[in-house]
Amino acid sequence: MNKEPAIQAENLSKKFGDFTAVDQISFTVQPGEIFGFLGANGAGKTTAMRMLTGLSTPTAGDARVAGYDVYREAEQIKRHIGYMSQKFSLYEDLTVRENIQFYGGIYGLSFRMIREKTRELIDRLQLGEVARSLVRSLPLGWKQKLAFSVALLHQPRIVFLDEPTGGVDPITRRQFWEMIYQAADEGVTLFVTTHYMDEAEYCDRISVMVDGRIDALGTPKELKEQYQVESMNEVFLQLARGQ
Amino acid sequence: MNQQAIQVNAISKQYGKGARALREVSLQVQEGELFGLIGPDGAGKTTLIRILVTLLLADRGEASVSGWDVVKDYRKIRRHVGYMPGRFSLYQDLSVLENLTFFATVFGTTIEENYDLIKDIYAQIEPFKHRRAGQLSGGMKQKLALSCALIHRPRVLLLDEPTTGVDAVSRREFWDMLKKLQQRGISILVSTPYMDEASLCDRIALIQHGTILDIDSPEAIVDQYNKPLLAVRSNRMYQLIQDLRDFEATHSAFPFGEYVHLATKYPLWPEVIEGFLVDRGHSHIEIREAEVTIEDCFMELMGKEELNENAL
């Protein structure tokens, strides 16, 4: 087993001109951990995530993701992580099957592997009847499950989930979290950003960004005890409002 | 005379040959009430609100807003009702002030005339009044949209998912604003997919697949939950959910943050569950009584709804 941290950031920073979007953040995420990455709009979450996914070069500090350096090995990072967001993951005007095949191709899976994975995935998600339907026509909950499975297609060690589960009913949302737990149980690291504060409570550990810095880091339980409140929502409100 | 702000009687709507968006939905919003329409995407919330603001015709059933029929009196409704659609629909290339002036003019009024009503909200974006609406942050857009929906001093305000995609701080602020408007006598119907916002409403309707699952105060809905409910955790979350579903006394087991909410068919000692989990190799087991939430109720009602569907 590889015991190297899945993500390791040290004083990671990003400046745009005079503006410091991310200000010396440091944290470590272990393999198989579900790590919640929270912050109000404009706190620097997206910028930090872009650096960790190899899309943006830091201006200072260090970070390694899946064992690769964010400065020198950004392309390797992109190959070895999965990414899913509520806003964009699947092509709406491709069918279920075409989406799976497309992503398999992008990540360089062999033709045989793609065929196997496609069959396996459609079976597991019970999408047989809609395999030839456009993704656009699927209910939101199905799309989310499919998008998550597609993000796991190339067996990445880390999956970044950007606001993954908005808008679905509570049962579908929980089915989705069970998929996340299952992936974590199999050793995949999950890096999750979300607006749902109650969803943050599903994570093993949580960090909260305020004005480019990480102002709080711990298990949901620790953070609630530290701020002497009942829910992550209140932890977040205290931090974000600076009260 | 009609004492209700909103009256909906057996409204049904189907889009083409697709699924029925609303199936005989009935509800009443009392004068001065803050009423929440709570359900996931695709439940029918937007369809119902569009019917009420006269942008869409129902297939069957009747509805009225402020005593005016949504078909016969649509002009009156359009004149006197405030509506904030789900998608930001102000003019992106007009400034904040231009947008507000435009809506005031359309309704034959002025900003000055109704400034007292929007003051608390508008004051927060007034420093940016010459900025184009398209360049505002999400929270500011929302405040501008609400100001525009209020500029003609409506008696009834309908808001379609005003807090979707907004961060926790802005959401809290928005609900504070709604409470203040309610105190000024405005009746409010607000839709949301966020179950945790239910407790902020006087009464709520839970809606799924175009069907109302329940209507009551949030407290009463929670009180109706009649299964023993425990919060359980252990060192292995995924395995815990699977194992609890195998447990003979289990009615349902759903992840709830750091815990799993376990509803049992009958009351039983926590030690019995603990013993079962120890046998399955769990450690760091914690079991305590759970506080019932609206989500627990919603899932329970969803389960019953499915049973009904299958029975039909």
Image (cartoon, rainbow, N blue to C red):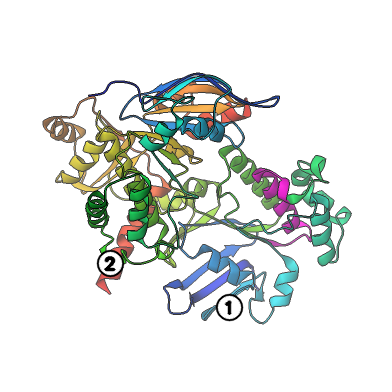
Q: Main secondary structure of the magenta part?
A: helix
In the rendered view, does B184 fall on the left or right side of B56? right
Q: Eyeballing the image, is B130 above or below B235?
A: below
Q: Nearer the viewer, residue B177 or A136?
A: A136
Q: Quadrant of the N terminus of chain A?
A: top left
Report the residue at 58% width, 49% height from top. Answer: B163
In the rendered view, does A57 fall on the left or right side of B267? right
Q: Is residue B252 magenta?
A: no
Residue A56 location, x and y as percent? Answer: 54, 32
The answer to whether any part of residue A159 appears in the image is no
Q: Which segment is the magenta one?
A: B134-156
Which residue is labeled 1 in the image?
A: B57
Tell me the tag on residue A29: none
Q: Nearer the viewer, residue B188 or A175?
A: A175
Report the residue at 14% width, 46% height from top. Answer: B248
Query: How many angstroms separate mark 2 from mark 1 (CA)?
Result: 33 Å
State the SS at label 2.
helix
The answer to whether any part of residue A110 appears in the image is yes
Kind of residue at badge 1: Leu
Tell me the tag on residue A129: 2
Circle 2 or circle 1, nearest the eye: 2
Residue B4 location, x and y as percent? Answer: 62, 67
Q: State whether discs 2 and 1 lie on one chain.
A: no
